[in-house]
Image (spheres, rainbow, N blue to C red):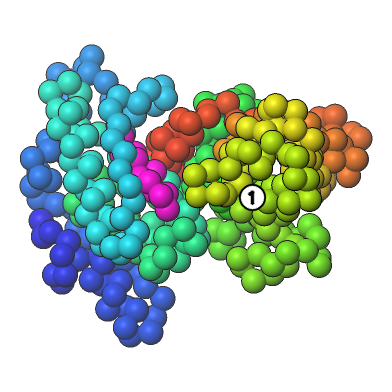
C-alpha cells in the first residue's frame, strides 16, 4: 500500500491536481491495501474471536480540537485520545496527525479485541457524505475538497463514513439520547455556529445536495446583524456564541453595576461563560442576555415545529450548560409562534449526551452506514 504523501495514488494529491485543473475536487479511488496498516491487525473478526468486543474507530474533527477513539455499538468509549487541531498547518498535517492518533488507539486495542469494523468521522460541513469529501467548512480554513474518506481508507483498509457533525449529532441523539425511541427528531448544535440534523421517520434526512439542516442560516430578523455567510439576520448571527458575547458586552456597558463587569476574563473579555456565571447569580443584565437570545432561538424553533412537526427538538452545547436560563425563554417564544397542536406534540430539551456527543456522533456515522 502506498503512503499518502504526493504519489500517484495519494487522494490528497489527486484533489490538488483536480483543483489546479479548475474542477471541483473529487477523491481518488483507492484500492484496498494488501498488507497491514502500520502494524495494526486489520483482519475481519474470526469465529475464534468470539467473546472479544466488536468496536469502531471514531474521529471527531473540530476547528479547535480533534478526538480519536474506539467505541462500541453500546455507546461505550474504550479508548480515547484528544489533540489540538493543527489548522494552521493545513489539511494534510491534520490528516497525518489523525492517522498517528488512530494508530495509537489501535495499539491500545490490540490483543483485547478483533480488528475494528469501520471508521466513523464527524466534521463540520459542507461536505459530500457519499464521497467523504469536505468542502471549505468555516472552522477549517483551507479544507477545500479534502478527501477524508479516501485518505483513511487507504491508510487503514477499513470502510470509512464521513458525516456533517450536526447530522452525526442527530444520529447520536436519536440512537442514544433524548430522541431514543422517537421517529421524528431535530438536533441543534449551539456553539460558535448553529447547525441542525433532521431525523424523519427514523432516518437521517440529508436533502437533495446534502445541505439539509442548515438551520443557522434561516432568516429570523431581515434587518438584523450580518452573518458570516453574507446574509443578514440569520439565526446563527442572533443566537450563536459570538452573538451571545456581543449581546453580553452591550448589556454590560449599559449596566455598569452588572456582575459581568467584575467577572471579565484575564484578557478583559465578557464571554458567554462570563455571562452565564453572572446569570446563575441572578444578575439582571446577564439574565437578559439569555432572555433575548432565547427569544430569537424560540422563533427558529417555532419555524422548525411548523414545517417538520417533530416529537423532540434536542439542543446541544450552550443549551446544555445554560439549561433553563436559555431554554425557558426559548420555549415561551416557540410556544407563542407555533400552532398549539404542534407545540403540544413536541418536547424541547437539552441534549442528554453532554460532552460525549462528539465521540458518539462519530461512532454513529459508522453505525448508520448505508442507511
Question: On the rendered image, what quadrant is the N terminus found in?
Answer: bottom left
Q: Which residues are magenta?
A: 57-70
The residue beneath circle 1 is 245
Residue 370: horizontal and vertical position, in percent?
Answer: 44, 44
Residue 100: horizontal and vertical position, in percent?
Answer: 19, 46
Mark 1 residue crowding within 10 angstroms, few (<14) / some (14–19) / many (20+): many
Residue 228 covered by magenta stretch = no
Front residue of this view, candidates 175 and 295: 295
> Does the image show residue 305?
no
Residue occupying the point 48% across, 31% down? 355
Residue occupying the point 88% across, 44% down? 337
Looking at this view, name the residue that lies furthest to the bottom.
21
SS of the residue under disc 1: helix
Residue occupying the point 24% across, 59% down? 93
* Quadrant of the rendered image containing residue 21: bottom left
Front residue of this view, candidates 194 and 305: 194
Drawn side of residue 127 relative to residue 80, left or right: right
Looking at this view, name the residue that lies furthest to the top.
51
Q: In terms of secondary structure, what is the magenta stretch mainly?
A: strand
* Quadrant of the rendered image containing residue 230: bottom right
Amino acid at each position: 500500500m502506498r503512503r499518502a504523501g504526493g504519489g500517484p495514488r495519494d487522494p490528497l494529491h489527486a484533489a490538488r491536481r483536480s483543483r489546479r485543473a479548475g474542477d471541483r475536487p473529487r477523491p481518488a479511488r483507492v484500492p484496498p491495501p494488501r498488507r497491514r496498516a502500520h502494524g495494526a491487525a486489520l483482519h475481519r473478526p474470526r469465529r475464534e474471536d468470539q467473546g472479544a468486543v466488536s468496536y469502531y474507530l471514531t474521529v471527531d474533527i473540530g476547528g479547535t480540537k480533534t478526538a480519536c477513539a474506539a467505541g462500541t455499538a453500546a455507546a461505550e468509549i474504550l479508548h480515547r485520545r484528544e489533540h489540538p487541531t493543527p489548522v494552521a498547518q493545513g489539511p494534510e498535517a491534520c490528516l497525518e496527525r489523525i492517522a498517528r492518533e488512530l494508530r495509537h488507539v489501535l495499539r491500545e486495542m490490540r490483543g483485547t479485541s478483533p480488528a475494528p469494523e469501520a471508521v466513523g468521522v464527524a466534521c463540520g460541513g459542507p461536505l459530500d457524505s457519499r464521497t467523504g469529501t469536505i468542502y471549505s467548512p468555516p472552522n477549517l480554513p483551507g479544507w477545500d475538497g479534502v478527501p477524508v474518506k479516501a485518505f483513511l481508507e487507504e491508510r487503514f483498509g477499513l470502510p470509512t463514513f464521513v458525516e456533517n457533525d450536526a447530522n452525526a449529532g442527530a444520529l447520536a441523539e436519536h440512537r442514544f439520547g433524548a430522541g431514543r425511541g422517537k421517529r421524528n427528531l431535530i438536533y441543534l448544535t449551539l456553539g460558535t455556529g448553529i447547525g441542525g440534523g433532521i431525523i424523519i421517520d427514523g432516518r437521517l434526512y440529508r436533502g437533495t445536495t446534502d445541505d439539509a439542516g442548515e438551520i443557522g442560516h434561516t432568516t429570523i430578523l431581515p434587518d438584523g446583524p450580518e452573518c458570516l455567510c453574507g446574509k443578514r439576520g440569520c439565526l446563527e448571527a442572533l443566537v450563536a456564541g459570538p452573538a451571545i458575547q456581543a449581546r453580553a458586552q452591550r448589556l454590560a456597558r449599559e449596566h455598569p453595576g452588572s456582575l459581568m463587569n467584575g467577572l471579565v476574563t484575564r484578557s478583559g473579555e465578557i464571554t458567554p461563560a462570563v455571562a452565564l456565571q453572572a446569570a446563575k447569580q441572578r444578575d439582571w443584565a446577564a439574565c437578559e442576555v439569555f432572555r433575548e437570545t432565547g427569544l430569537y432561538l424560540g422563533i427558529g424553533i417555532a419555524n422548525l415545529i411548523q414545517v417538520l412537526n417533530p416529537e423532540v427538538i434536542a439542543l446541544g452545547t450552550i443549551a446544555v450548560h445554560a439549561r433553563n436560563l436559555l431554554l425557558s425563554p426559548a420555549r415561551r417564544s416557540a410556544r407563542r409562534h407555533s400552532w398549539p397542536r404542534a407545540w403540544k406534540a413536541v418536547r424541547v430539551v437539552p441534549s442528554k449526551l453532554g460532552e460525549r456527543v462528539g465521540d458518539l456522533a462519530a461512532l454513529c456515522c459508522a453505525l448508520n452506514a448505508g442507511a
